[in-house]
Image (cartoon, rainbow, N blue to C red):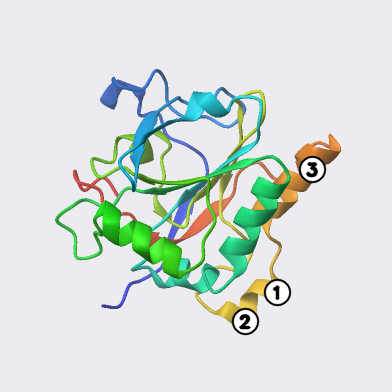
Amino acid sequence: MQRRPLLALGALAPFASMLPALASAATVGQPAPDFTLMDTAGKPVKLSDFKGRNVVLEWNNPGCPFVRKHYQGNMQALQKETIDQGGVWLAINSTRDDSPDYQSPAQLGRWMAEQKAAPTATLMDEDGTVGQAYAARVTPHMYVINAQGLLVYAGAIDSIASARVDDIPKATNYVRQVLGELKAGKPLSVATNRAYGCSIKYKNGAA
């Protein structure tokens, strides 16, 4: 199945009124909305448990060619770098359970293992509550939360919106750049931009 790339603004829309389970909508520069999701092994993972560490959120769908592009080694390397530096990486799948792209927790866990991926956890968000709270529009849509719990980045993984693996070395990797600037105590060069990838197949059709 072919997919047309969707460009989504990294600026985040107010979803708090639609999502009473979350205290507030995600806004860059403000506290990241807390959430609890089950991982692919059926264990609950709570975002606020990681306060004091940088956290990367990665919206994931193995059926998306843009995701597959970065899982040729780029995403795995970023995951390892983040965790080796004391950070946390949460991969989140918000695909509704009646979509052709849907994978069960066991299937998604197996796919991640086959890719030799190394996130801290892979989380299931089939009802889309967390994805919509963060205004995630595409896969991969990337977010960085600093050690104080503030959302400091929302947008693309890098600067070249293509599904070509050959473009990865030529692109500016925004996630790596943000994490490096946080580590160095420098002001962030970029806080939001256009995310690129495949539209997320939300249960309510929001994307």
Q: Secondary structure at mark 2?
A: helix
Q: Is residue 8 left or right of residue 99?
A: right
Q: Amino acid at mark 3?
A: Glu
- Label 3 crowd bin: few (<14), some (14–19), many (20+), radius 10 Å: some
Q: Which percent across, then down, holds residue 151?
A: 58, 32
**In the rendered picture of this protein, how many numbered marks are placed on residues?**
3
Q: Residue at x 68, y 60 (%)?
A: 173
Q: Quadrant of the rendered structure where residue 181 is?
A: top right
Q: CA distance from mark 2 to mark 1?
A: 7 Å
Q: Quadrant of the rendered structure where residue 125 is?
A: top left
Residue where numbered disc 3 is placed: 181
Q: Earlier in the sequence, mark 1 or mark 3?
A: 1
Of 87 and 126, the residue lying toward us: 87
The quadrant of the picture occupied by the N terminus is bottom left
Q: Amino acid at mark 1?
A: Pro
Q: Please, is residue 104 above or below residue 182 in the view?
A: below
Residue where numbered disc 2 is placed: 166
